[in-house]
Image (cartoon, rainbow, N blue to C red):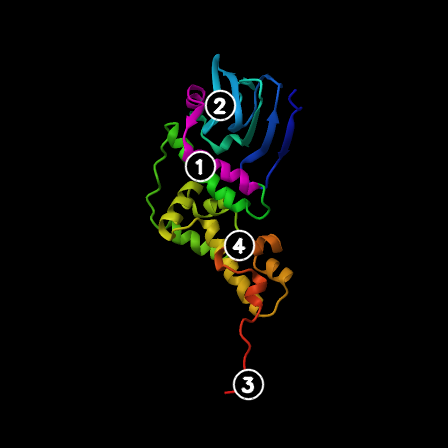
Amino acid sequence: MLPGPSIRAWRPPLDGVAEVLHARFGTHAYPMHAHDTWTLLLVDDGAVRYDLDRHERGAFGEMVTLLPPRVPHNGTAADRHGFRKRVLYLEPGQLPDNLVGASVDTPALADPALHRMISTVHRLVRSPGDEPAADDLLTVALERLRSRLGDHPAPPPHGGAARDLRELLEAHIVPGLPLRTAAATLHFAPAHLVRSFRREFGMTPHQYVISRRVDLARRLILAGQPMPAVAVGSGFYDQPHLIRHFKRILGVSPGRFARPRWATSSAL
């Protein structure tokens, strides 16, 4: 006998994401229902059979499934083994209304790269302090999703978006700046900013901010500040967040960085 449902749902501190849901279901069958959000679905184990617009559909493997707002659907396991899924429920404004028809016609996309992006977003939103990285990646993933569904917005002609964004980020290294706030300030689409920044500097805006925070942290460490103050003073969520990124970039922990490796001899 299969165990009962296992569900974890929460609202992350991520613009445009109404809910994250991680769940495992056995015999439960969703009746016909509708959401006011876009449903971005990954099925990690098993398979899901559902009806959408009077057509039977399926979700499994590396398929990325997008169900539009206010279009009823149901859902059940395709076999007796149940299924495990991860879902991002996106606010309606995250995708244009003209994609509703396309997502009804083709709700499931075979796109391993897009699947990896969305899977990584799920991992990042579970790690405190990494929400800005999730925001950057989700922005790129949604642009790819729009393109796969036939929506190709024309890029703005201005070529200085990356440098403008770098200047803005430099003014907000410690407090941070949400991507959509930067986009509104600079009058660019968030996806265009991320794409331009990565093309110009070889990294995402959030990766740039993290690298600059590590740079600031090492200065505070060498100035003799205690690690809790270093973490706060350089903009990290907490000490584990500082340690993880410090070691990833510099190859050593903050504690080892601060520890003298060589004794200074008075003899010459």
* Apparent side of residue 152 relative to residue 250 in the rendered image (left or right): left
* Apparent side of residue 66 relative to residue 24 in the rendered image (left or right): left
Residue in front for this viewpoint, 29 or 209: 29
Q: Residue at x 62, y 67 (%)?
A: 225
Could you say whether the residue bearing mark 1 is in a helix, strand or loop?
helix
Q: Which residue is mark 4?
A: 245
Q: Which residues are magenta?
A: 101-125
Label drawn at residue 141:
1
Contact check, label 3 and label 2, Cβ < 8 Å: no
Q: CA distance from mark 2 to mark 1?
A: 19 Å
Which numbered disc, 4 or 1, marks the residue closer to the eye? Answer: 4
Of pointers 2 and 4, the one earlier in the residue sequence: 2
Q: Position of residue 44 (x, y in %)?
A: 52, 30
Residue 116 forms part of the magenta stretch: yes
Q: Which residue is mark 2?
A: 59
Where is residue 127, by image quadrant?
top right
Q: Which residue is mark 3?
A: 266
Q: Which residue type carries mark 1?
A: Ala
Q: Position of residue 5 (x, y in %)?
A: 65, 25
